[in-house]
Amino acid sequence: MTPLQSEIRRLYLPLSARPEPAADGGAPAGSPPASPFFDADGRVRCMVMELARPPSWRLLGAVWQGVQAELELPAPAIAVSGTDGLQLWFSLTEPVAVAEAHAFLEGLRRRFLPEVTRSRLRLLPTADAAHPGRHAAPVPALQADGDNWSAFVASDLAPVFADTPWLDIPPSEDGQATLLRALAPTKRAAFDAGLQLLAAPPLPMPAPMPPPPAALPTPAPHALQQPAAGAPAAQDPRQFLLQVMNDATVPLPLRIDAAKALLPWPQREGGTPPPAG
């Protein structure tokens, strides 16, 4: 087994061996579809979301980032389909029923790609009666036209393949194995928590904030300069000191201080202090 085959088995293939084909070459009665990603009970450890016609890493990258940032799940692998789409490959430590796998992918679609038309998305494995048990084609692989390859790609190279989601040469097996070796499958408890979060209705939008109260009117400048009714009029400082000095009810030390303050301003005729200098 090559390193690439080991990584694909670790991440995506069933934990138990599939039943052997019947003697006539057909599948055993009641067995799941022939895709290598189904186990003997029709369960899967591999889920694939593909965006095509046209592919867009700007949109699919939001899912790749949201799975890690919002759901706190391991990063899925990124792949080019070899034909017309970009893909996210999700890995699980334990197999789940097809209905659960599809519900998880549908929840991702509703949460991160609500504006994308359904015709551009492939959620695999399928859970509809028209295509029971349909799953993604293995990656990497040469396509039917014999010219292009599907392959796993690094996240920083994904935008490069937005217009041409394929390789025109066989990908390096060692390089593919290295990309997958860095990935971790999602544990069952984390998958269940993510599925529950995706199934929850979206939080209601917060109520709009009430408008701020109107600002109080600014008083006119002249209103600020006028004393309030009944307030004493402003008093000349010299006149005030004279009143303090002559008021017998004021303590003597204060009267003396008032007299000292008046000394530089000897009263002259007209009641004005002497000119400076």
Image: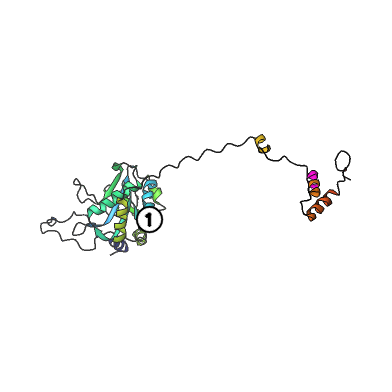
- Residue 85 in sight from this viewpoint: no
Q: Quadrant of the C terminus?
A: top right
Tell whether 19 sits left or right of 192. left
Predominant secondary structure, magenta span: helix
How far across and how far down the image is residue 247, in percent? 79, 49
Between 46 and 53, which is closer to the camera in this rendering?
Answer: 46
Q: Is residue 142 magenta?
A: no
Image spot of residue 218 (x, y percent): 60, 37
Q: Residues within 10 Å of mark 1 (few under 14, many from 20)?
A: few
Q: Is residue 2 above or below residue 201?
A: below
User: Residue 91, relative to residue 242: is it above or below?
Assistant: below
Relative image position of residue 38 (x, y in whole percent): 22, 57
Q: Which residues are magenta?
A: 237-241
**Can you give x and y, in whole percent of width and height, for residue 35 in the image?**
22, 54
| 84 with respect to 262 (left or right) | left
51 and 71: which is toward the camera: 71
Circle 1 SS class: helix
Determine the residue positioned at 31% across, 51% down: 198
For the question of whether residue 255 can be seen, the reply is yes
Q: Which one is in front, 140 or 237?
A: 237
User: What colouring does the structure picture have?
Assistant: rainbow
For residue 9, what is the image quadrant?
Answer: bottom left
